[in-house]
Image (spheres, rainbow, N blue to C red):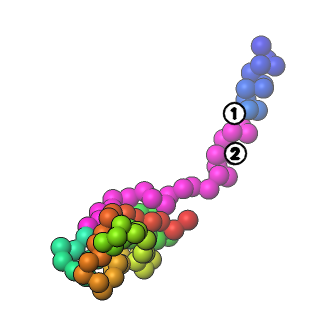
Amino acid sequence: MKRTFSVLSITAAVLATAGAMAPTASAGVGNCKTWTSNSAPYTGSAYCSEIASADKFRVKVTCVDPRGSTWVVYGPWVKNTKTSTAKCSDNPNVGILKTGVSFSA
């Protein structure tokens, strides 16, 4: 019985130490909103709040042309309570397929 308790105590101590030393993954946690403009040239924007002060984010916009070709453009890296915006193209026939958020690691 004492040996089982001792092994469990050592295992718990090792797991607690590993958890204390593991890096925290705060990127991606927060309240983010994305939106697109209503007219050409089409832009996508992202605004995030409640993220860690060291974290940064940027808008990720998937663009589409009349032939169905797609590509991704990114806005500038910004910090908490800022807005990141990216434009697909000056061509009014290029639209936005989807808008999302990318976080720094």
> Compared with residue 8, is residue 66 higher up or lower down, i.e. above or below?
below
Left or right for 4, reference 29? right
Magenta segment, which residues?
13-35
Looking at this view, name the residue that lies furthest to the bottom: 90
- Mark toward the start of the polypeptide (1 vs 2): 1
Q: Amino acid at mark 1?
A: Ala
Image point (57%, 55%), residue name: 24
| Inter-mark Cα distance, 1 to 2 | 9 Å
Dot 2 surroundings within 10 Å: few (below 14), some, or many (20 or more)? few
Residue 15 colored magenta?
yes
Q: Which residue ends up furthest to the left in the rendered image?
A: 38
Q: Name the image quarter holding residue 48.
A: bottom left
Q: For mark 1, does the 10 Å Cα neighbourhood hold few (<14), some (14 to 19), or many (20 or more) residues?
A: few
Q: Which residue is mark 1?
A: 12
The N terminus - image quarter: top right
Q: Give amino acid for label 2.
A: Thr
Which residue occupies 73% across, 39% down? 14
Q: Residue at x 40, y 69 (%)?
A: 69
- Position of 88 relative to 53 (above/below): below
Q: Residue furthest right?
A: 3
Q: Quadrant of residue 43?
A: bottom left
Q: Which residue is mark 2?
A: 17
Q: Report if residue 26 is visible in the image.
A: yes
- Residue 13 image offset from top left, x and y in percent: 71, 37
Q: Would residue 104 appear left or right of 75 to someone viewing this image?
A: right
Residue 30 rendering spot, x and y as whole percentages: 38, 58
Q: 35 or 14: which is nearer to us?
A: 35
